[in-house]
Image: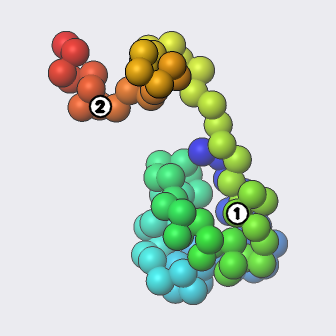
């Protein structure tokens, strides 16, 4: 998931630590979200948006995965499902 947290945070002259304290998370969590290493849970996304004075939609952009190997076709619901590490291990 793409995000504009770093840009928005810096415009408001907030450090990662400042934002973390406002949202009651660790600085490492803010760093991980900003660097696309962790997708924020919905509750954290709303806390971040509130703290930065914007909407969740302004902070986050959903990125569609393009690798075919990451998808599975679900016959039951006729839709694409994303594979997880556990599913890949079981298929091997």
Residue 8 vertical position relative to residue 37 in the rendered view, above or below? below
Image position, residue 76 (x, y; %): 41, 21
Q: Is residue 83 visible?
A: yes
Which disc is residue 56 wearing?
A: 1
First in sequence: mark 2 or mark 1? 1
In terms of secondary structure, where does tag 2 sit? Answer: helix
Residue positioned 59% across, 66% down in the render: 45
Image position, residue 53 (x, y; %): 77, 78
Residue positioned 54% across, 81% down in the render: 23
Residue 16 as seen in the image, left or right of residue 50: left
Residue 47 as seen in the image, left or right of residue 55: left
Q: Quadrant of residue 52?
A: bottom right
Residue positioned 66% across, 43% down in the render: 62
Image position, residue 88 (x, y; %): 27, 22
In terms of secondary structure, where does tag 1 sit? Answer: helix
Residue on which the image places disc 2: 85
């Amino acid at each position: 998931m793409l995000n504009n947290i770093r840009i928005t945070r810096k415009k408001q002259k907030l450090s990662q630590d400042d934002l973390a304290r406002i949202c009651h998370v660790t600085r490492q969590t803010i760093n991980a979200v900003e660097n696309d290493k962790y997708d924020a849970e919905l509750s954290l996304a709303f806390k971040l948006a509130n703290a930065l004075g914007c909407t969740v939609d302004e902070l986050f952009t959903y990125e569609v995965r393009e690798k075919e190997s990451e998808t599975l076709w679900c016959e039951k619901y006729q839709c694409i499902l994303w594979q997880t590490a556990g599913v890949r291990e079981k298929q091997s």
